[in-house]
Amino acid sequence: MPALALVTLVVADYDEAVDFYTRALGFELAEDTDRGDGTRWVVVRPRGAGGTGLLLARAKDEVQAAAVGAQTGGRVGFFLHTDDFARDHTRMTAEGVRFLEAPRHEPYGSVAVFEDLYGNRWDLLQPAGA
């Protein structure tokens, strides 16, 4: 059965992206391999997830650089699930993550939109019943 393994996220700089995702979001660095041509194969994923991860790909030209932070046209494009919304919201806020709204409690769960270091929008979401 097919499974989604990686989603590419175009970034401006490998190291600053790794720092943000591992420090501010609490992800783990799953792989960082030098490809020998000035590029790296860098994968981060939520700790313990073991499944889908983000392939952090440094922009290599002007077209890709223009897409950094706008890969989903200003919409929420990424959804980070948590089993403890208050804990993770507090930790992420302390790490300097910019939330665009106060936490909301919807029928489907607790949620707040935040931006990553480049401006991509994410939902921090604790699904109802989690």
Image (spheres, rainbow, N blue to C red):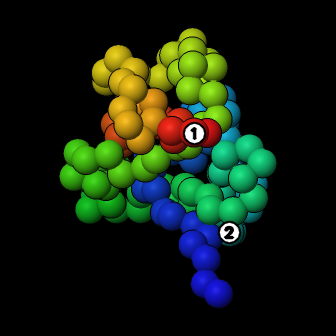
Residue type beneath disc 2? Arg
Q: Residues within 10 Å of mark 1 (few under 14, many from 20)?
A: few
Horizontal side of 101 relative to 123 (left or right) equals left
Q: Against 129, is 39 above or below?
A: below
Nearest the viewer among 20 and 36 is 20
Residue 36 visible from this viewpoint: yes
Q: Quadrant of residue 18?
A: top right
Q: Residues within 10 Å of mark 2 (few under 14, many from 20)?
A: few
What residue appears at the point 57 percent right and 67 percent down from the top-left corner? 6
Q: Against 127, is 30 above or below?
A: below
Horizontal side of 5 relative to 77 (left or right) equals right
Q: Against 76, is 52 above or below?
A: below
The percent position of residue 49, horizontal first and vertical second, equals 72, 53
Residue 17 visible from this viewpoint: no
Q: Secondary structure at mark 2?
A: loop
Nearest the viewer among 41 and 53 is 53
Which residue is labeled 2 in the image? Answer: 35
The percent position of residue 78, horizontal first and vertical second, equals 43, 49
The circle drawn on residue 129 is 1
Q: For the C terminus, give its image quadrant.
A: top right
Label 1 – label 2 distance at C-alpha: 43 Å
Q: Which of the two labelled residues, at mark 1 and mark 2, occupies the earlier sequence position? A: 2
